[in-house]
Image (tube, grey):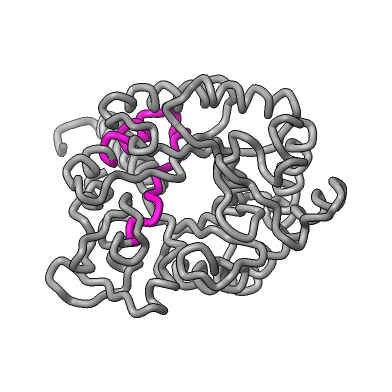
């Protein structure tokens, strides 16, 4: 540039710096968006699997920590269910406050982000059953509201005491029919709304930055989601994220028949309610490895395609819960104790 006038050199240099900075900034934004996408798993069975002697192995046959195996496959998030007063049954018990704290701290030390899933029950809560904890069975509705607040606040306080503040908290698990039946049934939306808001308020009292999720099954069913969240809106339910389950197995249709419906519903939820969306449960048949891998890739593609980064992530439900241990055929773990190649989809997406 020695023959170019000084003022022109300055302009050219400024433009070049501006372009480089702009490219770098754009790249950083893209990287941030990519890194902020949650890819993970619900692993509530893991402590019991380990306690009963189940061993986890990498593809080369070396024994490894299960969480490390999941992390190596691109996962960055762990979801943990919590029950009120669970029993000691290996598959339908545990997941107490104390056990949840131990697992959450362990996962956080592995660099994982944390989601806590409150069932508000002593065992499984899902569309078919929403049993009140035994200790709450005879409580009045005002007492149930206090129970929800106190239990949520208590568990999150215990987590915070060990340095874990979850990024997400689910208030209820798969609640198309409500929770804490019969008082919190969708037959009485006003009461369900009050219960959900108690969970929201307790969560925000711990940390206002925690995102509260309300979770409904059959993520491909737009009519069901519109009905539920229209009612939630009409009853002033407070939440940040719409959580969806997506299991082609349970709706008895291959993912190729319903993935477009899932994508439509994700986008509709964002546009209609101005909320973020997240697949908090997904799973495929363990023996259909290629199909499950393609299902995961298609699901992540659909969530990532939601405009303005409103699609937060995709979580597999109990991928490590090998059928030989759990009897569950929608895990993603092989008979030899090694992760299914289907989970490689998380690395690729």
Of 287 and 212, the residue lying toward us = 287
Measured as percent of width and height from the top left, residue 250 is found at 38, 37
Q: Residue at x 14, y 73 (%)?
A: 61
Taking the view exactly as shown, the residue that stands out farthest to the left is 60
Q: How many marks?
A: 0
Q: Residue at x 58, y 49 (%)?
A: 125
Residue 303 covered by magenta stretch: yes
Q: Is residue 73 above or below residue 63?
A: above
Measured as percent of width and height from the top left, residue 73 is found at 26, 57
Left or right side of 154 for 247: left
The part of the chain drawn in magenta is 296-321
Of 178 and 109, the residue lying toward us = 178
Q: Residue at x 12, y 70 (%)?
A: 60
Q: Is residue 262 above or below residue 185?
A: above
Q: Is residue 82 above or below residue 62?
A: above
Quarter of the C terminus within the rendering: top left
- Write down the quadrant of residue 293 in the picture: top left
Using the rendered image of the protein, determine whether residue 71 is visible from the camera's viewpoint: no
Left or right side of 9 for 150: right
Quarter of the N terminus within the rendering: top left
Measured as percent of width and height from the top left, residue 312 is found at 45, 40
């Amino acid at each position: 540039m020695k023959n170019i006038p000084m003022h022109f050199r300055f302009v050219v240099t400024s433009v070049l710096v501006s372009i480089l900075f702009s490219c770098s900034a754009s790249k950083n934004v893209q990287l941030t968006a990519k890194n902020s996408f949650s890819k993970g798993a619900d692993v509530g069975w893991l402590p019991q699997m380990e306690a009963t002697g189940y061993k986890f192995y990498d593809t080369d046959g070396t024994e490894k920590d299960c969480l490390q195996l999941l992390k190596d496959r691109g996962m960055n998030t762990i979801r943990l269910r919590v029950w009120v007063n669970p029993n000691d049954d290996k598959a339908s018990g545990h997941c107490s406050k104390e056990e949840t704290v131990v697992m959450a701290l362990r996962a956080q030390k592995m660099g994982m982000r944390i989601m806590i899933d409150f069932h508000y029950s002593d065992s499984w809560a899902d569309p078919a059953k929403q049993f009140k904890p035994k200790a709450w069975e005879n409580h009045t509705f005002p007492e149930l509201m206090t129970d929800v607040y106190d239990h949520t606040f208590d568990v999150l306080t215990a987590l915070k005491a060990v340095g874990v503040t979850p990024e997400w908290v689910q208030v209820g698990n798969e609640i198309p029919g409500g929770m804490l039946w019969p008082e919190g049934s969708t037959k009485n939306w006003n009461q369900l709304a009050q219960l959900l808001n108690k969970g929201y308020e307790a969560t925000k009292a711990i940390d206002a930055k925690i995102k509260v999720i309300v979770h409904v099954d059959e993520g491909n069913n737009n009519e069901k989601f519109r009905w539920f969240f229209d009612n939630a809106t009409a009853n002033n339910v407070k939440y940040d994220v719409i959580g969806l389950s997506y299991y082609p197995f349970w709706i008895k249709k291959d993912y190729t028949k319903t993935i477009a419906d899932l994508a439509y519903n994700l986008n509709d939820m964002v546009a209609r309610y101005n909320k973020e969306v997240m697949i908090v449960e997904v799973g495929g048949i363990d023996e259909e490895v290629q199909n499950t891998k393609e299902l995961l890739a298609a699901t992540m593609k659909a969530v990532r395609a939601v405009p303005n980064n409103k699609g937060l992530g995709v979580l597999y439900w109990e991928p490590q819960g090998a059928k030989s241990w759990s009897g569950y055929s929608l895990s993603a773990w092989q008979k030899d104790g090694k992760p299914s190649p289907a989970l490689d989809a998380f690395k690729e997406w």
